[in-house]
């Protein structure tokens, strides 16, 4: 997995950013969600990030029992392994050197959602995904809660 970077809404962002040169940036992240415990779905899900580096806004809903269909994979299990299982990530450190770290979490129990709107400023600025393309994602998957581990310190890779 290639990590572009991370926006963190905490003063603690200074530690990984300066100590390990991780591409982590400060931002204000706000969630407005209406979760329905009886169905295990979100009636409304809004995430908005105010950040110079990577402003973002995504709005979703899980109105019904949408089927989990993940195009381009031989079966659902294979798709979930590729799309949601933790892997080793690579990234450019803030000093330009290549770094790597690992993330781990339990198996996710994702459910499909429907995109209402999305705008990821970093993807547009890097010309990776246009504003129009962001409105037609491959998949939209939600997990109400997940704890994960970032194995630190990261490593610097030598050429």
Image (spheres, helix red, strand yellow):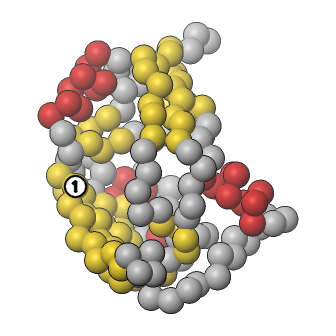
Q: Is residue 141 left or right of residue 54?
A: right
The percent position of residue 104, horizontal first and vertical second, equals 54, 36
Front one among 78 and 34: 34
Q: Is residue 24 above or below residue 126?
A: above
Q: Is residue 115 in view?
A: no
Q: Is residue 151 left or right of residue 72?
A: left
Q: Is residue 90 above or below residue 78?
A: above
Q: Secondary structure at mark 1?
A: strand
Q: Is residue 58 in view?
A: yes
The percent position of residue 105, horizontal first and vertical second, equals 53, 42
Q: Is residue 127 left or right of residue 85?
A: left
Q: Residue placed at 45% from the left, 81% from the top?
A: 39
The percent position of residue 102, horizontal first and vertical second, equals 54, 29
Query: Among all residues in the image, which is located at the extreme front?
Result: 38
Q: Is residue 150 above or below residue 85?
A: above
Q: Residue placed at 53% from the left, 24% from the top?
A: 100
Q: Residue placed at 35% from the left, 18% from the top?
A: 20
The percent position of residue 65, horizontal first and vertical second, equals 56, 86
Where's the N terminus, which quadrant? top right
Quarter of the rendering containing residue 18:
top left
Label 1, residues with CA under 10 Å away: few <14, some 14-19, many ≥20:
some
Q: Which residue is mark 1?
A: 29
Q: Residue placed at 50% from the left, 15% from the top?
A: 155
């Amino acid at each position: 997995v290639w990590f572009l970077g991370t926006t963190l809404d905490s003063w603690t962002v200074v530690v990984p950013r300066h100590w390990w040169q991780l591409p982590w940036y400060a931002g204000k992240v706000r969630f407005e969600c209406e979760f329905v415990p009886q169905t295990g779905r979100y009636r409304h899900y809004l995430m908005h990030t105010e950040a110079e580096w990577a402003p973002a806004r995504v709005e979703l809903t899980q109105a019904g029992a949408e089927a989990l269909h993940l195009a381009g994979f031989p079966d659902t299990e294979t798709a979930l392994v590729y799309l949601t299982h933790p892997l080793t990530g690579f990234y450019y450190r803030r000093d330009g050197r290549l770094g790597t770290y690992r993330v781990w979490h339990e198996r996710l129990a994702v459910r499909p959602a429907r995109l209402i709107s999305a705008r990821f400023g970093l993807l547009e600025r890097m010309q990776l995904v246009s504003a129009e393309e962001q409105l037609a994602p491959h998949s939209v998957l939600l997990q109400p809660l997940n704890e994960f581990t970032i194995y630190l310190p990261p490593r610097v890779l030598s050429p």
